[in-house]
């Protein structure tokens, strides 16, 4: 059966990030046909500036190349003031330019989020349509929006709540199934 290249990005820069933990959990629970790279090095992306286009910094080049090479993305994205974190949105902006030949299109994308009271549902309601408008397919089900996730998930992806693991595993199964479908 075909293997699929999946790039995982974390929108939190916090050392003990629970959203990074969700990515590690996804790596552990995903079907073996998903070959997942957690792009922890993307924490070094500078704020996007169109002036870079003449001489793109190395980490920007690496991020763009990694997105091009991937069949799918997993975004571990915290909710900041009902939207994605600045770092997460910045990473998306990086691969949305140059307009018309941008890297972030035709990808299948799963968003996982760990927030506080909202769990990230407000952020996902914004981010899903943004990614769709760039030409990507967002896996909607099941919604992975973990309330008070920082208290429940370690940065290494451990949790003592089996429901969180089941949600993440189901999201990865649905991502895999979508990648198996033609078109
Ligand atoms: C600036 C800021 C704004 C936040 N706004 C929200 C919010 O609107 N909704 C929410 O559920 N959590 C909010 N939070 C909480 C974070 O989503 C929460 O701390 C999350 O677990 C951080 O992810 P991490 O463990 O990966 O760092 C906010 C945190 C910060 C720092």
Image (tube, rainbow, N blue to C red):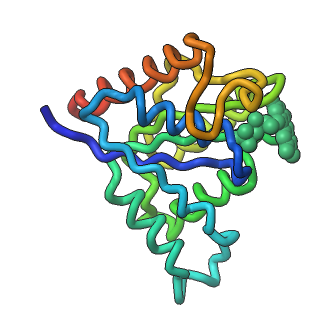
Between 113 and 132, the one nearer to me in the picture? 113
Q: Which residue is drawn at 74% across and 48% down?
A: 85
Residue located at (58% from left, 55% from top): 92
**Place of residue 171 in the rendered image (x, y in percent of width and height, measured from the top left):** 46, 23
Residue 169 position (above or below residue 92): above
Q: Where is residue 154 in the image (x, y as percent from the top left)?
A: 65, 34
Q: How many labels does the image show?
A: 0
Q: In which quarter of the image is residue 143?
A: top right
Is residue 81 among what the camera can see?
A: no
Residue 47 percent location from the top left of the image: 70, 69
Q: Position of residue 31 (x, y in %)?
A: 31, 27
The quadrant of the image that shows the C terminus is: top left
Residue 144, quarter of the rendered image: top right
Q: Residue furthest bottom?
A: 54
Query: With respect to residue 85, does 55 lie above or below?
Result: below
Q: Is residue 112 above or below residue 20?
A: above
Considering every residue shown, the one lying at the far left of the view is 1
In the current view of this chain or complex, which residue is farthest to the top? 163
Q: Name above or below for residue 19 compared with residue 53.
A: above
For the residue pair 99 and 7, the one nearer the viewer reads as 7
Residue 177 visible in the current orientation: yes
Tell me the quadrant of the picture where the N terminus can be found: top left
Q: Is residue 181 left or right of residue 86?
A: left
Q: Which of 2 and 166 is in front in this view?
A: 166
* Quarter of the displayed picture in which ligand 1 can be seen: top right
- Residue found at x 45% / y 63%: 102
């Amino acid at each position: 059966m075909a293997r699929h290249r999946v790039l995982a990005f974390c929108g939190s820069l916090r050392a003990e990030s629970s959203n990074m933990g969700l990515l590690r959990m996804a790596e552990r629970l995903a079907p073996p046909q998903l070959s997942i790279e957690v792009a922890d090095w993307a924490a070094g992306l500078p704020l996007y500036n169109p002036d870079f286009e003449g001489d793109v910094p190395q980490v920007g080049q690496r991020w763009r190349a990694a997105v091009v090479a991937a069949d799918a993305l997993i975004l571990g994205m915290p909710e900041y003031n009902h939207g994605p974190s600045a770092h997460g949105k910045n990473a998306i902006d990086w691969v949305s330019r140059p307009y018309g030949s941008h890297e972030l299109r035709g990808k299948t994308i799963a968003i996982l989020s760990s927030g506080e009271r909202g769990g990230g549902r407000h952020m996902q309601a914004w981010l899903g349509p943004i990614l769709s408008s760039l030409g990507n397919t967002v896996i909607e089900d099941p919604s992975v929006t973990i309330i008070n996730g920082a208290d429940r998930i370690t940065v290494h992806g451990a949790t003592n709540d089996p429901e969180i693991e089941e949600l993440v595993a189901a999201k990865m199964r649905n991502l895999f199934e979508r990648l198996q479908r033609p078109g």
